[in-house]
Image (spheres, grey):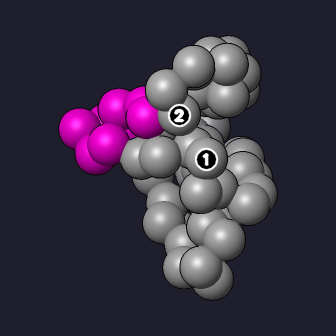
Amino acid sequence: MPAYKVVLSFIDGTMDEWLFEENPNLKISEWTKQQTGWVNIQGTYVNTNTVKRIETIEIDEQTDR
């Protein structure tokens, strides 16, 4: 069963990542529509107004993690 890694790159040059068991693209779509810009990603509040790029990477059993 594949897993997914979501990598957020921020405008200040920092990055953060989270692992998901299911494809997170629907959640990401919901995050980008938030009026306030603040979303809760697995218990961490992130200001999406400071996100430069969002990348979703599928990880399978054959891939080194």
Q: Work out whether mark 1 precedes mark 2 in sequence or the reverse, and give the earlier one.
A: 2
Q: Position of residue 63 (x, y in %)?
A: 66, 64
The residues colored magenta run 38-45
* Magenta stretch: helix, strand or loop mostly: strand
Disc 1 to disc 2: CB gap under 8 Å: yes
Residue at figure coordinates x 55%, y 73% from the top left: 15
The CA distance from mark 1 to mark 2 is 5 Å
Q: Which residue is mark 1?
A: 49
Q: Position of residue 25 (x, y in %)?
A: 71, 26
Q: Which mark is residue 37?
A: 2
SS under mark 2: loop
Can see residue 6? yes
Can see residue 62? no
Residue at figure coordinates x 53%, y 34% from the top left: 37
SS under mark 1: helix
Q: Nearer the viewer, residue 22 or 42?
A: 42
Residue at figure coordinates x 61%, y 47% from the top left: 49
Reply above or below: 16 against 33. Answer: below
Is residue 12 located in the magenta-colored stretch of the structure?
Answer: no
